[in-house]
Amino acid sequence: MKRPILLLASVLLLLLPVWGVWSFAGQPPEIEEILRQTDALLADSRYEEALALLEGFSESYPGTRQDAAARMEAAAIHGKAFHDLERCRQIYESIIQDFPRTPLCQDEVRQVAPPNLR
């Protein structure tokens, strides 16, 4: 079970910059500031603080493409920094369930997702 989750995490991390969902350009000022703060925290390896900011972001902007990007970033932190693959899997499953019609879930993610989530 761990291999599909790691593969899923790898696919998502590779695709995130391509989609441009986590960029500053064209975002409202409050979102830009949150994105800058998160990037700064991650650059300083302050993962717990970054997770708190990302979770707050997802609560403030639910259902947006930035929410999906924030959750992907949070899942990556859980997997890479904390080696918490179970929490990583839970977050990815929530993305698949909450954003089933996005390119994120249509092709690449569904290919590596567990069969019950395809």
Image (spheres, grey):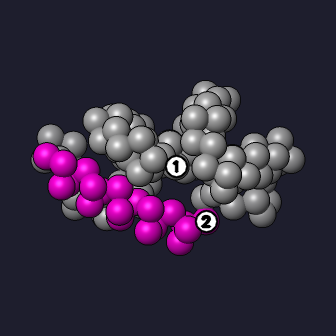
Q: Is residue 5 magenta?
A: yes
Q: Nearer the viewer, residue 40 or 101?
A: 40
Could you tell me the amino acid type at mark 2? Gly
* Residue 74 visible to an observer of this rendering: yes
Considering the whole magenta stretch, tell me its main secondary structure: helix
Q: CA distance from mark 2 to mark 1?
A: 13 Å
**Above-or-below relation of 110 to 67:** below
- Residue on which the image places disc 1: 73
Q: Residue at x 63, y 43 (%)?
A: 46
Q: Pointer 1: residues within 10 angstroms few (<14), some, or many (20+)?
A: many
- Residue on which the image places disc 2: 20
In what element is the residue under mark 2?
loop
With 106 as the anchor, is 23 left or right in this view?
right
Region rendered in magenta:
1-20
With 43 as the anchor, is 3 left or right in this view?
left
Q: Residue at x 52, y 49 (%)?
A: 73
* Residue 10 image point, x, y percent: 35, 62
In what element is the residue under mark 1?
helix
Could you tell me the amino acid type at mark 1? Glu
Q: Is residue 49 magenta?
A: no
**Above-or-below relation of 21 to 65:** below
Q: Nearer the viewer, residue 118 or 44?
A: 44
Q: Residue at x 76, y 46 (%)?
A: 37
In the rendered structure, find residue 84 and report the number of the disc placed on it: none
